[in-house]
Amino acid sequence: MPSFSLSNLYLNSHLKVVYFFLYMPIIVLMVLSFNKAGLPTVWSGFSVEWYGKLLDNESILNAAWNTLIVAVISTILSSILGTLLALGIERMKVNSGLDALLFAPMIIPDIVLAIALLSFFTMLDFTLGLHSIVLSHVVFNIAFVCAVVRTRLKNFDYSVIEASEDLGAGSFTTFRRVTLPIIFPGVLAGSLLAFTLSVDEFIIAFFTAGAGSSSTTLPMQIYSMIRFGVTPEINAMATIVMLVSFTMVFLSQRINKGITQ
Amino acid sequence: MSSVIQLRNLQKVFGQTRAIDDVSLDIQENEFFAMLGPSGCGKTTLLRTIAGFESPDHGKVLLSGEDITPLRPNKRSINLMFQSYALFPHMSVAKNIAYGLEMEDLTKQEIQRRVADVMDMAHLHEFANRRPDQLSGGQRQRVALARALVKRPKVLLLDEPLGALDKKLREQMQLELKRLQSEAGITFVMVTHDQEEALVMADRIALMKDGRVAQLGSPKELYEQPNSRFVADFIGSMNFFDGTISGDRITLKNGTQLSGVVTADDMNHGTLAVRPERICLHREIPQDADNRIQGVIEDIAYHGQDLSVHVAVANDAQRKLARISATLAEEQELKLGESVWCSWTSQHGRLLGA
């Protein structure tokens, strides 16, 4: 039918425009990270020297190390807590009000959460530093891990837990050998997502890092560098961060899809 | 023979409903026992109470004379085959079967040997390394059965074991399960809503209604000697003639007097229950019949080996059903709208209370 193929054509070009709009700036950034000249806008030949310079920059390496520490610890903590939360919530069949509250940390604007966390830490006279960033990241990551694990639990046949118990296993053995392996793809997908979010997160880390450069994370480092203009060095770093995030998101989707089929 | 399972005054209430209402039962060793009933009659709750997944509000469960009421399911020498089979989706068939043995203090060789044995018995060897989602429904059912049997429980509980299979496979598995039961020498307790399944497979049946055992007996007893209208109606098809009872006689609303076997004292209002296959049809009045009643043929359904003839009787809203063999029907040449006499001997009618 001609009308059908016409609308198809229209949809197709719309799709291409959207993707172009979304990804062109990123591609430009990636290309410019290989620019020989120090100017952000004029191409003057291919070079990887900016990537080399990154590795010599003490404060960037320090920030990268901080980011890794925050991301790894907050991911581990939020994966454990988020998974247990998901298991409990799915079993309890809580009312919809409580259910909606679970999503709150995902929906609340980061800036609001950042201010709230900072006020909370100050009220408790809690010293700020990497550990307070970790705790803050755990707060919103629990919600994301929980949401991802819960989608896995929707198709979970709870009778396998009873079957395991019936065959002689205690509750811990049942969790370790039956429940966890079955939901593990969901847990892994959730923790990869949590890791990505933590690596990228700027506002909350910025508010809860406290004074001093010892707890600067990578996004904070980029932010402070950018005040002196965008250099190819920043482009190079952004490219690396983005590749890490992309890989994580891609993996998390692949894993999550894997067991649905 | 001794009782392997004894249920003593079990009670379980869920909110407003009495799921189990004072049930006491003895299940014998090496018996194939069926708990039959409509949905919501408490049969599954009773099964889960024996397995240990529900704890009774009142009463005891004894296994070989030992009170196991407070024990968790993993401490009971009883295994349950789940209706959904509940196979572990992330384990191969062999791993699924070995799982229960790994919870016991056994050597690796012993586990391997017993898994291999049970896979032989259930014809599962070629599927040992497959995952449950790579199996058909019938194969999954055999894995679930093997996984439970390999534990050598004193009692195997089966929750609607054939419910998920198609008709042909179901009939085949009915006999297969019976064979496995007698070979393994294990007591089977099955829950089913399918009366035909219970009749074919079970040694004894407890027919349940509203959390109570309505009647307990062999399939033949339940079919031939029902003690209540509910049992008579649930098992097979049945004709009921409602009326007023005195002695072994019942007077219908249209004045016809019939007689049958008395099942209880002092019944006033009640019914006479007669199986369709016990009824004979005649064109002429059968003078020397114990019981006879006249009606008009309203419907004839052809089943191949036999026919169902529906007969309308005056002043009775329920049509009566006679099941007669095809050869007899050919001789009689029954036609729709024809007036016929139904007759049967008194020993084949049972007088039941209202």
Image: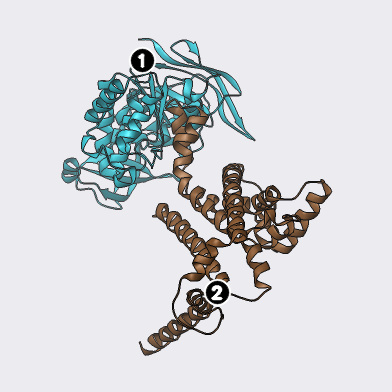
Chain colours: A brown, B cyan
Q: Are marks 1 and 2 on the same chain?
A: no
Between B29 and B256, which is closer to the camera in this rendering? Answer: B29
Disc nearest the viewer among 1 and 2: 2
Relative vertical location of residue B285 with respect to residue A103 in this rendering, above or below: above
Residue A137 visible here: yes
Q: Chain of mark 2?
A: A
Point 79% across, 51% down: residue: A120
Res B225 → quadrant: top left
Q: Position of residue B311 (x, y in %)?
A: 34, 45
Badge number at residue B29: 1
Relative vertical location of residue A230 with respect to residue A165 in this rendering, above or below: below
Res A9 → quadrant: bottom left
Point 66% across, 63% down: residue: A220
* SS under mark 1: loop
Relative vertical location of residue B211 with respect to residue A251 in this rendering, above or below: above
Q: Position of residue A214 (x, y in %)?
A: 69, 53
Between A183 and B134, which is closer to the camera in this rendering? Answer: A183
Point 49% across, 80% down: residue: A20
Q: Residues within 10 Å of mark 1 (few under 14, many from 20)?
A: some
Q: Is residue B166 left or right of residue B159?
A: left
Q: Residues within 10 Å of mark 2 (few under 14, many from 20)?
A: many
Q: How much space separates mark 1 and mark 2, taking CA atoms?
A: 83 Å
Res A114 → quadrant: bottom right
Q: Chain of mark 1?
A: B
Relative vertical location of residue B20 with respect to residue B105 in this rendering, above or below: below
* SS under mark 2: helix
Q: Position of residue B230 (x, y in %)?
A: 46, 32
Amino acid residing under circle 2? Pro
Amino acid residing under circle 1? Glu
The residue that disc 2 covers is A232
